[in-house]
Image (cartoon, rainbow, N blue to C red):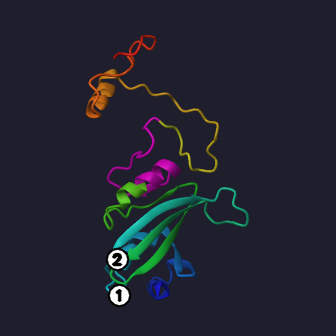
Amino acid sequence: MSQVALEKLAARFEAAVLETHGFRGDETAVVEARALREICLWLRDEPSLAFDMLCDATAVDYLTYPGRGEKPRFEVVYHLYSTQHRLRLRLKVLVPEELPEVDSLHELWPIANWLEREIWDMYGIRFRGHPELRRILLYEEFVGHPLRKDYPKEKRQPLVRRPEPEIAEVLARRGRARPILDLANPGSPPKR
């Protein structure tokens, strides 16, 4: 049934849809990055499709994928669902290594805010128009993007010490009155 959605998308955005394929009900369209926002807006607002839910967004790094040819290094992948028509659709956007950037979809589906932050954090792909593109899983001082295939697996990250008042505040929120260890004096015995 999602094949109908794929056909409508290909007919409406013939120039921006690079390829389509489906396998056992998993319909996929590879679209140009410049048309992503317009395509998603149409998919959401077209009454016969009504893709009102962004289920997931992720990325793929094809750094050394054999047979990839001249295709860009990254793909950003969106999984859409229509609760009204029970349709599923996967959109893929090719993203070059030189300028890894696509438009943000947070205004169309608010959950995209968090998903795009995760993609930025793990892959380093930027989202134009995102209101607060900052790390979501790693700390701000983390260097690099760990799900990139060229990220060195043995890389050491900087140790970031937090001020004791900040730690005490976190522990107080967790129900502890004081820190277990005196972080200002690492050799001191634990406080009871």
Q: Is residue 124 magenta?
A: yes
Local crowd at mark 1 within 10 Å, few (<14), some, or many (≥20)? some
Left or right, 17 with reference to 169: right
Left or right, 23 with reference to 43: right
Residue 129 visible (yes or no):
no
Q: Nearer the viewer, residue 43 or 35?
A: 43
Q: Position of residue 55 (x, y in %)?
A: 41, 67
Q: Which residues are magenta?
A: 117-141
Query: What secondary structure prevails in the magenta region?
Result: loop
Residue 8 visible (yes or no):
yes
Which residue in the structure is indicated by mark 1?
48
Which residue in the structure is indicated by mark 2?
44
Q: Is residue 158 magenta?
A: no
What amino acid is at disc 2? Arg
What amino acid is at disc 1? Ser
Local crowd at mark 2 within 10 Å, few (<14), some, or many (≥20)? many
Q: Residue at x 57, y 54 (%)?
A: 98
Left or right, 171 with reference to 74: left
Q: Position of residue 31 (x, y in %)?
A: 51, 74
Using the image, determine if residue 161 lies above or below residue 54.
above
